[in-house]
Amino acid sequence: MHALSRVWAATRWAIAAVIVGRGAWLVMELMQRMPGAGEAPMEVPFAFWYGNWRAVLITSGVFIAFLFGFAFPTRRAEWRNAGLYSAFIISLFTEMYGLPLTIYLLAPLLGLPAGSFGVMESHLWAYALDRLGVMPINMGVYVVMLVSMILVACGVGLLAVAWATVHRGRGGLVMSGIYRFLRHPQYLGLILIVLGFNIQWPTLPTLLMAPVLIAMYLSLARREDRDLASRFGEEFLSYAARTPAFLPWRRSARPITHNGAPQPAVPDRQRP
């Protein structure tokens, strides 16, 4: 059992490295293929790009394994959040590589055949910037990919580092490492991943699910507030008073009391 635990721990970090490495590789590819280099970036036609169900399965599997590896749910509310997050991931990569439902719905409204959306045009924010005359689509794809991959990489890093920090705490109140600066780095990491993917490859289902997911994680954080405030007492209240919840530059000005009214924000998933 101990050997299996070590294998899973190594696999967990390998998955995180693959995700960050893949994102860095994509950004480097785009930088090398910027306008003026003699080749348009990623000119892949509709028929060649979509229908890749193998990519749907592999990419969805990697991200869901990462989610459960670094944020394994243990309570009912956490399982609900993890289920919706998994649905978000599957929906995203189904439209990214398999069946682009959003493009099938959008193309007729623009008076275009769906087949005119190659891989560049399928970055819908970049396509919108091009249609509005803000910037050419080549540059738009570069911008949305760069911004989105920075957000996803930061989210993956926050989730993994926060998990490792809490794991070393062995059940105590963790106030070191990343938790010196944020009380909810894991939840912030999950939110950044959602935002990053909605910038990179927006779809109707993921745009609708994003605010629901964010609201659910904020609610889960408040629920854990009550538990940890009761469990750790003054030690936690003092920590929560000096450490911001999600934004490093924002601190709560509200008083924190033992009875939880108003509810203090606390470190998310403070248990190994």
Image (cartoon, rainbow, N blue to C red):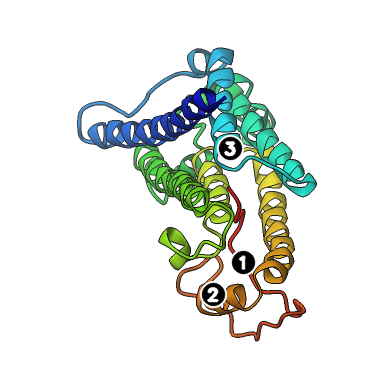
The residue that disc 2 covers is 239
> Looking at the image, is 194 positioned above or below residue 46?
below
Instruction: First in sequence, mark 3 or 2: give its number.
Output: 3
Outermost residue to the left? 37
Q: Residue at x 48, y 62 (%)?
A: 179
Q: CA distance from mark 1 to mark 2?
A: 8 Å
What amino acid type is highlighted by mark number 3? Leu
* Label 1 with label 3: CB-CB less than 8 Å: no
Question: 271 or 162: which is nearer to us?
Answer: 271
What amino acid type is highlighted by mark number 2? Tyr
Q: Position of residue 144 (x, y in %)?
A: 43, 44
Q: CA distance from mark 3 to mark 2?
A: 27 Å
The residue that disc 3 covers is 67
Instruction: First in sequence, mark 1 or 3: give its number.
Output: 3
Does residue 137 show up?
yes
The residue that disc 1 covers is 266
Q: Position of residue 59 (x, y in %)?
A: 53, 24
Question: 237 or 183: which is nearer to us?
Answer: 237
* Crowd tier of the residue under label 3, counting other residues whose Cα lies within 10 Å: few below 14, some 14–19, many 20 or above: many
